[in-house]
Image (spheres, rainbow, N blue to C red):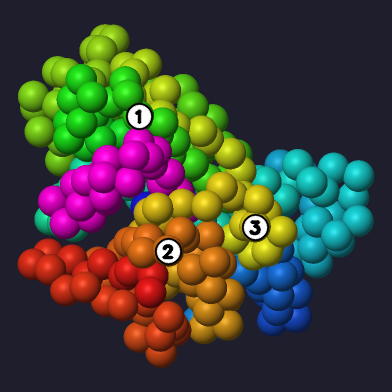
Amino acid sequence: MKETLLPKSTTTGFSSNRLKITNEEFIQLRDFIYEQSGIYIAETRKYLVENRLANRLKDLNLKTYGEYYYFLRYDSNRRAELNRLFEVVTTNETSFFRNNPQLEVFKEKVLKKLLDAQRKAGQKKLRIWSAGCSTGDEPYTLSIIIHEVLGMEISQWDIKITANDLSEAVLATARQGIYSEYSLRTTPLPLIAKYFTKEGNQYRVNNNVKRLISFGQINLNEQMQLRRVERSHIVFCRNVIIYFDDDMKKRVINAFYDNLLPGGYLIIGHSESLHNISRAFIPEHHTGAIIYRKQ
């Protein structure tokens, strides 16, 4: 529930005559970003790349975007800078209980059905993968929903939510689990009282919610990393794939298909679609959401 590419604020701290990126430099950096992350930046967004990276050049005391590209390729600190690059080319617009109609469908049509099937099979085990978890709002929301559905029975279950993101910075925020009132703007007040502890003007996620979640960095462009994720009953990847080109979308969706257990579910953003991307999933149409099921 994340991960959008550009635009953030256009404020960079530079004056209006800040350094311009050349066409050649843009192509170099665009191709490098795609190579590293699978995020595709159209030429119409060239000015946004310039905007986002201006402060990185300033902080590194570099004079051109070409020098920055060289730094990313060859400098001894390139790995740390790559994380900074990921931070500035992605936007993390998210909140708890974002797109609640879709979450209601997940709760009533997917989660409860799956839990019943697991009970009948004598396997009280549930695995969910939140791919593109941003600052943690989505996986914590899922944990809260699971607690609400299972109640006291949750202690009898083996439940794990694997929450991954490209940016280490947002993962640090997620692990901390402290949020502003704005992050909770779409969260029902009784759930805030039940699952958060107020600390001044902020809210800390309670430990029982945290306990179900394992956070870690992942690059959806790295097939070996994706293969290491434990197989899942449900994959959430909302508001991510619309920022990939068709080739990258197909690779990521295929990876999700391979990860899902038979009969598992894929939940993508309400504005996203698998049309022309994959025919491997069966779309289930519900009021408020389309859910994709593995055949």
* Secondary element at tag 2: strand
The C terminus - image quarter: bottom left
Which stretch did the figure color magenta? 108-136
Say which amino acid is labelled 1.
Answer: Trp
Quadrant assignment, res 284: bottom left
Which residue position is annotated with label 2?
262
Residue under the point 61% across and 43% down: 217
Quadrant assignment, res 178: top left
Is 113 in the magenta? Answer: yes
Is 219 in the magenta? Answer: no
Cα separation between marks 1 and 3: 25 Å
Where does the image place residue 220, in percent across and percent down from the top left? 59, 60
On screen, residue 169 above or below 41: above
Nearer the camera: disc 3 or disc 2: 2
Badge 1: residue crowd in 10 Å (few <14, some 14–19, many ≥20): some
Say which amino acid is labelled 3.
Answer: Arg
Label total for image: 3
Which circle's residue, 3 or 2, is located before the other in the chain? 3
Which circle's residue, 2 or 1, is located before the other in the chain? 1
Cα separation between marks 3 and 2: 16 Å
On screen, residue 280 above or below 270: below
Residue under the point 27% across and 76% down: 283
Cα separation between marks 2 and 1: 20 Å
Where does the image place residue 17, in percent across and percent down from the top left? 59, 62
Which residue is at the front of the view, 294 or 23? 294
Q: Are marks 2 and 1 in contact (CB under 8 Å)?
A: no
Which circle's residue, 1 or 3, is located before the other in the chain? 1
Q: Which numbered dot is residue 227? A: 3
Q: Which numbered dot is residue 157? A: 1
